[in-house]
Image (spheres, rainbow, N blue to C red):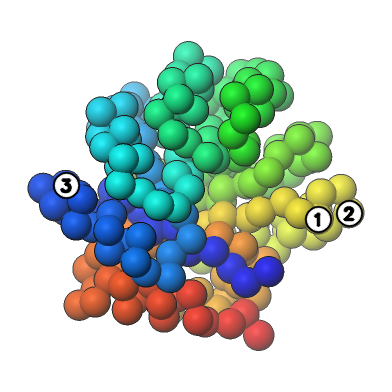
Amino acid sequence: MSHLIAPSVLSADFANLQRDIEMINASAADWFHVDIMDGVFVPNISFGFPVMEAIKRYAEKPLDVHLMIVNPDQYIERFAAAGAAMITVHYEACTHLHRTVQAIHATGCRAGVALNPHTPVSMLKDLLTDLDMVLIMSVNPGFGGQQFIPNSLNKIAELRKMASAVNPDLLIEVDGGVGLHNTAALLQAGADVLVAGNAIFAAASPAGMIAELKQIEGG
Ligand code: DX5
Ligand code: ZN
């Protein structure tokens, strides 16, 4: 399988959201990455249901919803109803993570777990067979446009090795500071899904950048 590109809507122009969504529809992108921040789990607030529902009205590709919120269990059904295809919660925000993953699957969505830069991939050892995806945060969550943390490459490689025996279909997504400079290395380490915000939306041609990121090979 070739890798997937998930542009982060957080970096879109919110005053021209329909235009940016249609750009992504027409591009080589695979998913829409939708960042939900509550100002508690992370030191920033992004947007909530009305904006996500507006995205869903125009998006012609699956919505990959990244919940950077405390107590995500409370909102899983609403995010599913708002059009999520994939719901990712943070390991650090869930006391009963196994139950949360089951609750996501009960809605019919695919389930992912995100790890902050300080959280070892080994924390997911006993949950790997239940997951569709693990999201390796390669910046501290909360903001677009931050610098990639190089140790993320080691975490991806370690996770790929861990998953190969028990869940070879597990998707590994990487989020934060992804661009042309590190895409080949990320693919080589074992990443399947690349989230990119700033690299895409700050480019002279966002659709051109998506095509470039999609074409790079891991070697
Ligand atoms: C950060 C978000 C990311 C962010 C990535 O907390 O989870 O999805 O939008 O943006 P870039 O690619 O600009 O680092
Ligand atoms: Zn994200």
- Name the residue that disc number 3 marks: 14
Q: Name the residue under label 2.
A: 165
* Distance CA(mark 2)–CA(mark 1): 6 Å
Q: Which amino acid does label 3 sit on?
A: Phe
Res. 27 visible in picture: yes
SS label for mark 3: helix
The part of the image, by quadrant, that contains residue 43 is: top left
Can you say which quadrant of the picture contains the N terminus?
bottom right
Indicate which label's residue lies in the foreground, 2 or 1.
1
**Image position of 184 with respect to 125: above or below:** below
The numbered mark, 3 or 2, whose residue comes first in the sequence reads: 3
Q: In x, y percent, where is residue 199?
A: 32, 68
Q: Would you say the residues marked 2 and 1 are in contact, meaning their CB atoms lie under 8 Å apart?
A: yes
For disc 1, the marked residue is 168
Q: Position of residue 80 (x, y in %)?
A: 49, 28
Pick the quarter of the image with the C terminus.
bottom right
Q: Where is residue 172 in the image (x, y as percent from the top left)?
A: 63, 55
At 52% across and 57% down in the image, what residue appears?
Answer: 174
Measured in 3D between alpha carbons, the distance from the residue under mark 3 to the one under mark 2, in whole angstroms, is: 43 Å
Residue 181 drawn above or below residue 61 = below
Name the residue at the right extreme. Answer: 165
